[in-house]
Amino acid sequence: MLIKLNQDVPASEVTDERVYLERRRFMQLLGGTAVALGASPWLQACTADSEAVDVRADGGPAVMPAQTPLPNVKPKVVTVDEKLNSFEEITSYNNFYEFGTGKNDPQRYAGRLTTSPWKVKIDGHCSKPADYHLEDLIRPHQLEERIYRFRCVEAWSMVIPWVGIPLAEIIKRADPTSKATFVAFTTLHRPSEMFGQNDPVLEWPYVEGLRMDEAMHPLTLLSVGLYGKTLMNQNGAPVRLVVPWKYGFKSIKSIVRIQFVDRTPPTSWSRSNPREYGFYSNVNPEVDHPRWTQATERRIGEFFRRKTLMFNGYGDEVASMYAGMDLRKWY
Amino acid sequence: MVLSKPLVFAACLAPFAWLVFRAFTGRLTANPIEDITLTTGLWALRFLVITLAITPLRRITGWNRLIQYRRMVGLFAFFYASLHLAIYVTDVMAVEGTFTFAPVAADVVKRPFITAGMVAFVAMLPLAVTSTRGWIRRLGRRWQRLHRLVYLSAAAAALHYLWKVKVMIGSPVYYAAIVVALLALRAVWALRSRRLRLP
């Protein structure tokens, strides 16, 4: 992949029309006057001259939907002392069955998804339910860079520099009632743009859930970007969850609804195969998947497997939430 | 119509050539070991299916010349299966800078889908060894009986693929259906010829 960064682009260079249109749509979406917009960090995101031109490995150049740099990101709020996976790796090797089951399918087909305008419904047991434009949901909060390990249930892993806000901040804004013991998340259901949703691979839309204390945990991130820019569609644009101590499928993508509920919400993979995938799905090298070992993993880009760490290496932060629980039973 | 053997040989080698090309030009996925494992495994199963399809095709179409390609296609199934197994074993053995065999043994014993894959491969071994003219002559009638092991191999391979995927739809189901159909056809023929032989 060839990523043209803005400093390499002469000021005179004409912006690709599609990028321009994307940006226009993004700006229109913000609404209001230019002056009002001036106060918003998101405006800078819109006007910064940048475009990611992607030349596909199989030769066909393809202009990916424009990624806009995210301004005012607090760097490395959480980080790990391990080598980052490349942008190319993170954006070419994905599980996002809404765009097909092949690892390269999301990169190939996610481009057709329209991610603006984007609304997120927050409802259920809370005193301030609302339908938010994504920008209104995110804008009041400080964006943070969080470099996390990401461990897929299929025994591969990456290190990814996410950008986002702690989910806890959004939850506090919604002010959940005492009845809210779990949080349920829903992915967009739009088979016209997500062709995988026409196949019964899973029951659509994709749903996920967390216990309230997991959702409020400071490591739980509502991500809107990676490598300092807005998310690519194949990574779950425009907004996704990142729960670094759980298997990747818990980190639901392209979220349209966050609901406060009073019982364990259904989750797509455990609904599809309850014997293999539980509600908790914490990374655990001692509890194997029925069909393969979880004791080791392949870090993308490495030849030798690594030993998988309990809670993906976040045990000091999260283990207390599961004290006294039999993690073999609650896999 | 005459298909020359070198042409069929080249066609059978093409998937391997394409894989090598992809490997040397950065066209594999970000997880190359997995990509190579999946590709070689799928081609092993495809060649097994083609091998099994030759006899029925010959019977139905009367195109007897097809038989002369069966051994080659079968050996290519073995070739791709060997690559598949070698890559898988390397993958599982390579842990933190060293190679250990324990994970492979554990996998074969504990995981039905790996066990099925092993059965498929082990069943092919004697077939590959006895595929030479000398062995055919030496074994005589027993050769044919021995080579019915290919039914076991194909069935185990289809099961291996079916059990491997996260969701049982699409391609693994199609392959299993084709293998079942090809084996069922033989069962039907065998029953019929037995009935005919009855007094």
Image (spheres, grey):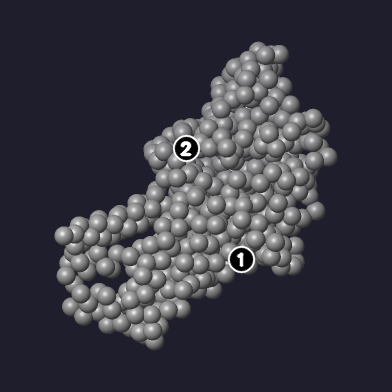
* Residue at the image position 65 percent from the left and 42 percent from the top: A247
* Residue at the image position 51 percent from the left and 36 percent from the top: A272
The spot of residue A196 in percent (x, y) is 43, 42
Name the kind of residue labelled 2 in the image: Leu
The spot of residue A284 in percent (x, y) is 71, 44
Q: Secondary structure at mark 1?
A: helix
Q: Quadrant of the C terminus of chain B?
A: bottom left
Disc 1 crowd rating (10 Å Cα; few below 14, some 14-19, many 20+) is some
| Marks 1, 2: nearer the viewer | 1
Check if mark 1 and mark 2 are on a common chain: no
Determine the CA span between mark 1 and mark 2: 31 Å
* Residue at the image position 65 percent from the left and 51 percent from the top: A293
Residue behind mark 2 = A202
Q: Check residue B89 in the rendering and tell me which mark sits there, or answer none.
A: 1
* Residue at the image position 66 percent from the left and 46 percent from the top: A288
Residue projecting furthest to the right: A316
Disc 2 crowd rating (10 Å Cα; few below 14, some 14-19, many 20+) is some
Q: Chain of mark 2?
A: A
Rendered view: A284 above or below B71: above
| B41 or B155: nearer the viewer | B155
Count of labels in the image? 2
Whether residue B51 is visible here, answered yes or no, is yes
Q: Chain of mark 1?
A: B
The spot of residue A64 in percent (x, y) is 50, 51
Q: Does residue A27 appear left or right of residue B178 in this picture?
A: right
Name the kind of residue labelled 1 in the image: Val
- Using the rendered view, name the quadrant where residue A276 is placed: top right
Whether residue A41 is visible here, answered yes or no, is no
